[in-house]
Image (cartoon, grey):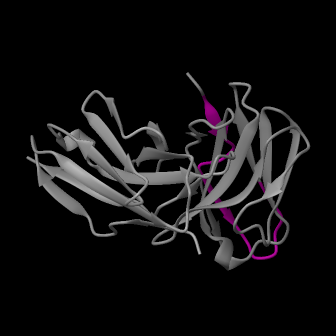
Amino acid sequence: SQKIEQNSEALNIQEGKTATLTCNYTNYSPAYLQWYRQDPGRGPVFLLLIRENEKEKRKERLKVTFDTTLKQSLFHITASQPADSATYLCALTGGGNKLTFGTGTQLKVEL
Amino acid sequence: DVKVTQSSRYLVKRTGEKVFLECVQDMDHENMFWYRQDPGLGLRLIYFSYDVKMKEKGDIPEGYSVSREKKERFSLILESASTNQTSMYLCASSLANNEQFFGPGTRLTVL
């Protein structure tokens, strides 16, 4: 069956460091992959979209890579700040309008 | 700015009651979605709609129905609420093959 895995353990890092979050998938041929941020008690907010023919995408301090051979996406936040603390969700689609979400990884950036 | 609004932030209902959750978007998006989010299970798609009066089942449609009479409005209906439907309900909208915009969520408790 199709499966999306994100590290369920919280990631704690120090302010200023680079946070790297992982999204692995199996039994999928995604057309594109998205990353969202979710704060407690709120709806997810879209961050980045990367297509299957793209290796890397950047937006300000964010970088996403997409390796369809490894079936993995990495999400990086450089120069992390306490305000980056949140849960980050990856989501895949096979090309239709329907997204399947991972369970998310909680990031905590400490002073 | 895209805005997706949901009728209630918090809702408490009794077992067996009929429950309506309303979602409105103001960006003329053709696609609308209903998810529920539970700890450890992540976001799961209940139903989605790609056009007025059109609907498709998501991954967990049992116990739910939907209505889309107007493009901007997508309603989720619990015909007879049960305690296992206690959850956070999130509505989203999108253009085709694009990022989803989420509402603030409705936290439903069924007693």
Q: Quadrant of residue A13?
A: bottom left
Most extreme residue toward the front is A69
State the quadrant of the C terminus of chain B: bottom right
Left or right: residue B73 versus residue B27 is right
Indicate the position of residue B2 as horizontal and vertical percent values: 59, 26
Indicate the position of residue A78 as horizontal and vertical percent values: 18, 38
Indicate the position of residue A105 as horizontal and vertical percent values: 34, 60
Q: Is residue A70 above or below residue B74?
A: below
Q: Is residue B111 visible?
A: no
- Residue at image coords 91%, 43%: B53
Q: Is residue B17 above or below residue A17?
A: below
- Residue at image coords 68%, 25%: B27
State the quadrant of the N terminus of chain B: top right
Left or right: residue B39 versus residue B66 is left
Question: Depth check: B21 or A85 in front?
Answer: A85
- Residue at image coords 28%, 69%: A9
Q: Which residues are magenta?
A: B3-20
Left or right: residue A81 versus residue A44 is left
Q: Does the magenta-highlighted stretch encompass residue B81?
A: no
Question: Depth check: B28 or A63 in front?
Answer: A63
Mark count: 0
Q: Does the magenta-highlighted stretch encompass residue B9?
A: yes
- Residue at image coords 67%, 32%: B95
Q: Is residue A66 visible?
A: yes
Question: Depth check: B17 or A95 in front?
Answer: A95
Indicate the position of residue B43 as horizontal and vertical percent values: 55, 60
